[in-house]
Image (spheres, rainbow, N blue to C red):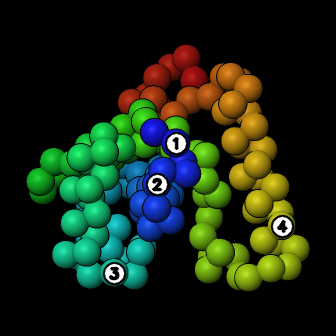
Amino acid sequence: MSKAALSESIQDYLKSVYKLQALEGRVTIGALAKDQSVSPASASAMVKKLAALDLLEHEKYRGAQLTPSGERVALEVPLLAAESVGRGGMARRAFDAVGELVVGLFRSGAHFAPVSARREGNPQL
């Protein structure tokens, strides 16, 4: 599935899940709702949509995590929302440059350990 086929809202949720699962492991609906500044019902509806697109796995009462496809899409979009670094300025350009670097490394086939592999304690990483 191409990034262009996904709405900006879906991309925002994928970025949030990626960021939260790196910090917390499985992501709860409540944590996702708080991060997106939406109601838990709205976050739950989006989680169901992402699961239907095979971008996310969700188990009731256990939280959600990105699938390998979801991780790839999340890495293709800027990892930080504009609100977290302000609009414009040097900080925004720096974060954009880092995002481009990550995407370039991912596309080049450089050794890259997804969050799920790090979380499982793979000794080869």
Q: Which mark is residue 83?
A: none
Q: Which mark is residue 38?
A: 3
CA gap between label 4 and label 2 equals 24 Å
Q: Residue shown at 71%/82% (left/top)? A: 86
**23 relative to 44, above or below:** above
Q: Nearer the viewer, mark 2 or mark 3?
A: 2
CA gap between label 2 and label 1 equals 7 Å
**112 relative to 48, above or below:** above
Type of the residue with mark 3 = Val
Q: Secondary structure at mark 1?
A: loop
Horizontally, residue 63 falls left or right of residue 31, namely: left
Q: Nearer the viewer, mark 1 or mark 3?
A: 1
Q: Which mark is residue 2?
A: 1
Q: Which mark is residue 93?
A: 4
Contact between marks 4 and 1 (CB within 8 A): the answer is: no
Task: Indicate which disc, 3 or 4, sits on the residue closer to the N terminus.
Answer: 3
Task: Indicate which disc, 4 or 2, sits on the residue closer to the N terminus.
Answer: 2
